[in-house]
Amino acid sequence: PVPAVPQVLRSCTEFVEQHGVVDGIYRLSGVSSNIQRLRQEFDSDRCPDLHKDVYLQDIHCVSSLCKAYFRELPNPLLTYQLYDKFA
C-alpha cells in the first residue's frame, strides 16, 4: 500500500503548480519569517489559505517549506539502503 501524501506537501505542490511559473522556484529560498509563519499555520490549521497576499508575493516560501519537509524526514526519500543503487 502506498502511504498517503501529507497535506502540507499536497497543498504546497498544488499551489506551486498553479502559481509557481517563475525561474528558480525550488532553487531560490523564501523569506525565513514567511516560511516559519506558513509552517506554524500548517501545524495549527492543517490547511492554511495559501492565497493570502503574503504567500502570493513570496511564492518561494511555499516551495521552501516543501524542501524543508523533505530535508527533515527521518529517513530520506532516497533511502540509505538504496543510496548505492541510485548513485
Image (cartoon, grey):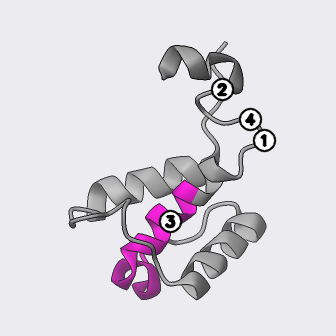
Disc 1: which residue = 74
The amino acid on which the numbered mark 2 sits, given as a three-letter code, is: Thr
Amino acid type, label 1: Pro
**Residue at the spot x=67%, y=12% of the render?**
1
Q: Relative to the observer, which residue lies in front, 14 or 75? A: 75
Tags 4 and 1 touching, CB below 8 Å: yes
The picture places residue 28, in percent across and down from the top left corner, at 37, 70
Counting labels gives 4
Q: Which residues are magenta?
A: 50-67
Up the image or down, 58 lies above or below 4; here it is: below
Disc 1/disc 2 C-alpha distance (Å): 10 Å
Residues at marks 4 and 3, CA–CA distance in whole angstroms: 19 Å
Residue 41 in which image quadrant: bottom right
Q: Amino acid at mark 3?
A: Ser
Q: Which residue is mark 3?
A: 64
Give the crowd class for mark 2: few <14, some 14-19, many >=20 residues within 10 Å.
Answer: few
Instruction: Answer with mark 2 or mark 3, whichever residue precedes in sequence.
Output: 3
The answer to whether the residue labelled 2 contacts the one labelled 4, judged by CB atoms less than 8 Å apart, is yes
Circles 2, 3 touching at the beta carbon (< 8 Å) = no
Q: Which residue is mark 2?
A: 79
SS state under label 2: loop
Q: Secondary structure at mark 4?
A: loop
- In-image side of 76 versus 19 (left or right): right
